[in-house]
């Protein structure tokens, strides 16, 4: 472990291991298998990178997205680590070069996709090489119950069959107990040591906003919280991705679409811009984000309801990887529930799988309708308890108002029943509000006892119906154009045996703000200009080298430079995040830049006096 700690300090620039990193690294160095569940931004990659450098041979890293391998290799190179990848983006000559380096034991880490790792020619090549370990990243892809299932992952036991003595590590940020068990079973890791860190991401502020006009609510949120920050906006369909990206662009933000319908060159270019420029918004389907290592994503927004809490947790985890404050914002409405339930009903899956999907969707709806601490609800889903409310979600900062909706719910359910359970939400609300539209008059529903019975407005009725559907009292029949149908759960509510307390419709357009601040904002006023100057200087260096700015240095490292004002290489070496290679590449430049900036400050102060 002394060698591992030396690598941590000299290559990566960190003084100590975090969380369970030391135990995991020790486990692999000693030749044991490991199953690691650690949240995004927790330092999972170090858990296999360092053992691969300590052990003899090359670490083979199974990574699902070839589009990100170049960025991962570039980042390692700047830390003085010999890394490479093999994938279809390379020419034959480039692939031959990597193979020669692998045979010569000149590579510390080799990244490959699961499809290539399973090929006979690749396995034959490895048989003639020294292998330090196998790392299977994004291991939740092995689970057929999960949100990113990839059949090739289930075949990765072939690596163990060919190389039974080589230690393996499977890593994921998202897995409930069922998924963890399936990872163990499918990858034959029953004897592996299991390391499960907390799912909590305390730097994320969770907020869910209900109602219509999702895009306008998104714009208010961006204007008030992230007017110039990088972020990701998730949408359910490709069409909505395109529309939202255009809409944000028209509003003056640099917003780019990303979905499977775009050609691979466009996707790659949009991803490159997002990684290498600051303040870019990617509008995407769930096809975007896995393996993204951009640390300064300050928000993740959902314009549609995710299918399950695993997807939600995985996607929101792409914000705030640097550990600094970030937002997980979601717009949620009645149509989201209807759409997801339609998709589930239309699935060709067997009954058992549909039951699992239904359970996961109900948990997602429960999170949205929660009136208590959202973090407690989210962690409880992953079998983790949080004793006290977090104080860093919308419900904690501004507790929602509730009301006794029993009578209003009875009116709504009665109206659904009396109209024959043949109409959708909008029609039933028109009856309840006494809107004498032609269709209602033709059906003689203006004669019903429920016509005009309630004193709620349209938004309040829609909020009520959304919660009745979310709570399982009603469902939309996809075979009958979304007609509302009652479930057996309605009986105790209608006969007075049950009371119903619901979230009150929020009329305010106010955006709940988190208590936390952005990177750099906690600096002393005198240090803030230097921080911004260093960011600009870093951007210029990144453009010259063709890498993302965060690969040069993280914002936290720049902030530490501003606070400590190192005046020598020895002092700069003590700044977290600056290892030996980066000290060699940028040390003198940073010292000279900081000194010159300080001199300019003094000259300006003298002139002002």
Image (cartoon, rainbow, N blue to C red):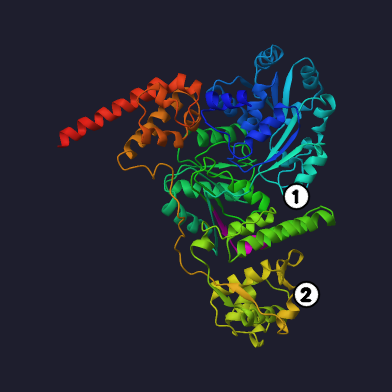
Query: For the image shown, how many numbered marks are present on the structure?
Result: 2
Q: Nearer the viewer, mark 2 or mark 1?
A: 1
Q: Residue 532 is drawn in which quadrant? A: top left
Q: Which residues are magenta?
A: 329-337
Above or below, 446 against 248 in this view is below
Residue linked to disc 2: 488
Judged left or right of residue 65, residue 603 is left
Residue 85 at x, y = what percent?
65, 23
Marks 2 and 1, the one that precedes in the sequence = 1
Residue for point 74% across, 64% down: 478
Secondary element at image label 2: loop
* Quarter of the N terminus within the rendering: top right
Callout 2 crowding tier (Cα within 10 Å): few <14, some 14–19, many ≥20: few
Position in image of residue 241 (x %, y %):
57, 48
Q: Position of residue 43 (x, y in %)?
A: 60, 36
Position above or below: 581 against 27: above
Res 177 label: 1
Please say if 43 is above or below 408: above
The numbered mark at residue 51 is: none
Residue at 52% of width from left, 60% of height from top?
394
């Amino acid at each position: 472990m002394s060698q591992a700690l030396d690598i941590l300090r000299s290559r990566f620039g960190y003084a100590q291991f975090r969380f369970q990193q030391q135990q995991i690294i020790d486990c692999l160095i000693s030749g044991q298998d490991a199953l690691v569940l650690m949240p995004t931004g927790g330092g999972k990659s170090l858990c296999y990178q360092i053992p691969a450098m300590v052990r003899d041979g090359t670490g083979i890293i199974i990574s699902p997205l070839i589009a990100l391998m170049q960025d991962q290799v570039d980042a390692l190179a700047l830390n003085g680590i010999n890394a490479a990848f093999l994938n279809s983006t390379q020419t034959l000559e480039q692939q031959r070069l990597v193979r020669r380096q692998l045979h010569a034991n000149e590579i510390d880490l080799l990244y490959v996709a699961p499809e290539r790792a399973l090929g006979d020619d690749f396995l034959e090549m490895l048989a003639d090489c020294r292998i330090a370990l196998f790392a299977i990243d994004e291991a939740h892809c092995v689970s057929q119950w999960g949100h990113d299932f990839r059949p090739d992952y289930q075949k990765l036991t072939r690596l163990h069959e060919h190389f039974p003595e080589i230690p393996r590590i499977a890593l994921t940020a998202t897995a409930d107990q069922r998924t963890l068990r399936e990872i163990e079973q499918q990858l034959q890791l029953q004897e592996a040591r299991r390391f499960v860190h907390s799912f909590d991401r305390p730097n994320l502020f969770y907020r869910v906003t209900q109602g219509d006009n999702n895009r306008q609510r998104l714009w208010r949120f961006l204007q008030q919280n992230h007017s110039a920050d990088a972020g990701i906006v998730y949408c359910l369909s490709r069409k909505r991705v395109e529309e939202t990206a255009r809409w944000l662009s028209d509003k003056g933000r640099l917003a780019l679409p990303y979905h499977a319908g775009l050609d691979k060159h466009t996707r790659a270019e949009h991803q490159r811009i997002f990684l290498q420029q600051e303040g870019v918004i990617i509008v995407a389907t769930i096809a975007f984000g896995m393996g993204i290592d951009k640390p300064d994503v300050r928000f993740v927004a959902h314009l549609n309801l995710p299918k399950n809490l695993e997807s939600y947790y995985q996607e929101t985890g792409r914000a705030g990887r640097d550990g600094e404050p970030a937002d997980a914002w979601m717009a949620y409405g009645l149509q989201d529930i209807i759409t997801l339930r339609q998709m589930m009903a239309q699935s060709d899956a067997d009954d058992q799988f549909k039951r699992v999907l239904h359970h996961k969707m109900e948990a997602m709806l429960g999170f949205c309708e929660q009136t208590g601490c959202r973090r407690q609800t989210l962690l409880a889903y992953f079998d983790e308890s949080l004793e006290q409310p977090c104080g860093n979600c919308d419900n904690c900062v501004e507790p929602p108002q509730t009301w006794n909706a029993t009578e209003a719910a009875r009116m709504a359910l009665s109206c659904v029943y009396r109209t024959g359970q043949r109409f959708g939400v909008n029609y039933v609300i028109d009856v309840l509000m006494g809107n004498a539209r032609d269709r209602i008059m033709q059906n003689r529903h203006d004669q019903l006892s429920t016509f005009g019975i309630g004193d709620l407005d349209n938004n309040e009725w829609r909020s009520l119906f959304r919660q009745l559907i979310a709570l399982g009292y009603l469902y939309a029949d996809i075979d009958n154009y979304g007609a509302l149908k009652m479930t057996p759960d309605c009986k105790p509510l209608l006969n007075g045996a049950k009371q119903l307390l619901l979230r009150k419709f929020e009329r305010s357009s106010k955006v709940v703000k988190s208590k936390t601040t952005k990177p750099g904002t906690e600096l002393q006023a005198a240090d803030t200009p230097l921080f911004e100057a260093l960011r600009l200087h870093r951007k210029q260096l990144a453009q010259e080298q063709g890498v993302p700015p965060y690969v040069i240095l993280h914002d936290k490292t720049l902030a530490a430079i501003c606070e400590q004002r190192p005046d020598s290489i020895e002092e700069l070496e003590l700044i977290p995040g600056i290892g030996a290679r980066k000290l060699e590449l940028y040390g003198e430049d940073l010292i000279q830049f900081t000194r010159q900036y300080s001199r300019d400050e003094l000259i300006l102060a003298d002139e002002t006096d």
